């Protein structure tokens, strides 16, 4: 019933803004000074608030991880908070809508000294190529605080929801004052992000989603079943990302602040295969030598048992690297560098040159093979931490414009799949490896 009411409210407001689009122009004009522009919004504290929004929003997933590691927050609730930020402000608002809707910002309009034409909120337009007005990214970030609000104790939940709505409204009003967004951009950011968060909460937390959660639990009992579900979800995203998202995300990454790029550059080579291959190979050889040099059967048996783990680790990394190299040559996808330098965005198989072997990402393949190996060795909580670290390393390849988003999605499938395959082969052959 509540969902239907929200849908009806969104529909009525959409009809209002379509019937009287001048509302947006009138509200946007409040922050505009003829001949000077939106100068008030560029001053303190308005610009400072705009600059602080990304860090404030990142407090949600950071707090979720901290609560999970400290065992104060159940894993499902921590995952809900992380997905709420990733899906709501991240994917829905800032990628799908802002980069594809084409609505020009107020400061770019003829009415406010620019060159673009005003367009209503719910009709796709051609007045902006990327990072457009609809919907407000800052407001979407503020409305993301609905996620922790929905996890608040029942006695505080309604007030927490109101506070989250107020946060989104304040962030959005600030952007209206700066000439960055219209009133409708803020309102529909609330509907889209709030709707996504509500759907996630229903599926992951609320009693109504218990049946769905039970079904998913049956599909994730073993590592193989979890990988199958992951592949079913990720494989369709790869062509979608190639067609719709890769270029816009690469352009966004190119505009990241230099300190952010330097941070990702500093960690990206953790996914370089040589460290993991050489390290696991040396440990494997050492264990084999200990087996050979053992003076009594008991010591020899103990070293044989220890040999299985580094040997499996090396096999997982090596096989993932070999399959990745073969796929790179067969797919022949151009790297972002050629897109920025020459405008090339294509596939040219077979390929051997570095700039034509973008898919799958080698660093991502390797680090997901490593994470899968660790996940099989460690308690489940630390296994998820290994995957979280692998995801950060994989994203660094996009943030540094070394790869496209689809490349790291493909790499995660290859690395995880090869590690699981090697694990199964080792167990079948009687090697003592973690299970």
Image (spheres, rainbow, N blue to C red):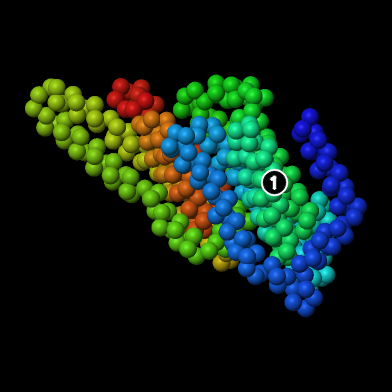
Q: Residue furthest front?
A: 155
Closest to the observer, 161 or 190:
161
Q: Quadrant of residue 34?
A: bottom right
Residue denoted by label 1: 165
In this view, 20 is above or below 60: below
Give neighbour class at mark 1: few <14, some 14-19, many 20+ (Cα, 10 Å).
Answer: many
Closest to the observer, 231 or 377:
377
Helix, strand or loop at label 1? It is helix
- What residue is shown at x 32% (from left), y 48% (from top)? 275
- What residue is shown at x 48% (from left), y 45% (from top)? 391
Describe residue 222's horizontal placement relative to residue 140 as left or right.
left
Percent x, y of residue 353: 46, 58
Q: Quadrant of residue 322?
A: top left
Residue 43 seen = yes
Percent x, y of residue 312: 32, 33
Describe residue 433's horizontal placement relative to residue 98 as left or right.
left
Residue 244 seen = no
Describe residue 32's horizontal placement relative to residue 243 as left or right.
right
- What residue is shown at x 36% (from left), y 48% (from top)? 273
Numbered disc total: 1
In this view, 366 is above or below 287: below
- What residue is shown at x 58% (from left), y 55% (from top)? 54
Percent x, y of residue 413: 50, 38
Percent x, y of residue 309: 29, 32
Closest to the observer, 47 or 11:
47
């Amino acid at each position: 019933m509540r969902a239907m009411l929200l849908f009806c409210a969104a529909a009525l407001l959409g009809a209002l803004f379509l019937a009287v689009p001048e509302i947006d122009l009138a509200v946007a004009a409040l922050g505009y000074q003829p001949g000077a522009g939106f100068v008030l919004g560029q001053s303190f504290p308005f610009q400072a608030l705009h600059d602080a929004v990304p860090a404030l929003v990142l407090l949600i997933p950071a707090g979720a991880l901290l609560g999970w590691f400290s065992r104060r927050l159940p894993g499902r609730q921590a995952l809900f908070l992380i997905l709420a930020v990733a899906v709501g402000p991240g994917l829905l608002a800032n990628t799908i809508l802002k980069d594809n809707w084409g609505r020009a910002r107020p400061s770019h309009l003829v009415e406010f000294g620019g060159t673009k034409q005003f367009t209503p909120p719910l009709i796709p337009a051609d007045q902006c190529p990327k990072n457009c007005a609809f919907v407000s990214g800052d407001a979407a970030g503020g409305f993301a605080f609905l996620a922790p609000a929905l996890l608040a104790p029942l006695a505080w939940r309604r007030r927490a929801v109101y506070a989250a709505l107020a946060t989104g409204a304040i962030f959005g009003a600030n952007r209206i004052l700066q000439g960055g967004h219209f009133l409708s951009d803020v309102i529909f950011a609330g509907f889209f992000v709030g709707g996504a968060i509500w759907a996630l909460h229903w599926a992951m937390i609320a009693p109504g989603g218990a049946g769905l959660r039970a079904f998913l639990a049956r599909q994730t009992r073993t590592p193989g079943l979890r990988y199958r579900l992951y592949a079913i979800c990720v494989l369709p995203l790869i062509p979608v990302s190639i067609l719709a998202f890769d270029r816009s995300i690469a352009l966004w990454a190119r505009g990241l602040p230099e300190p952010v790029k330097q941070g990702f550059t500093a960690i990206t080579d953790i996914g370089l295969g040589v460290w993991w291959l050489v390290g696991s190979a040396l440990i494997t050889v050492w264990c084999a030598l200990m087996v050979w040099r053992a003076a009594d059967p008991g010591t020899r048996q103990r070293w044989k048992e220890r040999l299985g783990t580094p040997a499996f680790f090396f096999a997982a990394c090596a096989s993932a690297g070999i399959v990745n190299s073969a796929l790179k040559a067969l797919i022949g996808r151009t790297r972002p560098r050629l897109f920025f330098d020459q405008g090339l965005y294509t596939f040219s198989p077979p390929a051997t040159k570095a700039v034509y072997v973008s898919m799958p990402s080698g660093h991502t393949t390797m680090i997901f093979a490593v994470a899968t190996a660790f996940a099989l060795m460690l308690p489940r909580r630390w296994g998820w931490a290994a995957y979280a670290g692998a995801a950060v390393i994989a994203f660094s390849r996009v943030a540094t414009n070394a790869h496209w988003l689809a490349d790291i999605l493909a790499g995660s499938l290859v690395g995880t799949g090869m590690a699981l395959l090697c694990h199964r082969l080792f167990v079948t052959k009687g090697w003592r490896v973690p299970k």
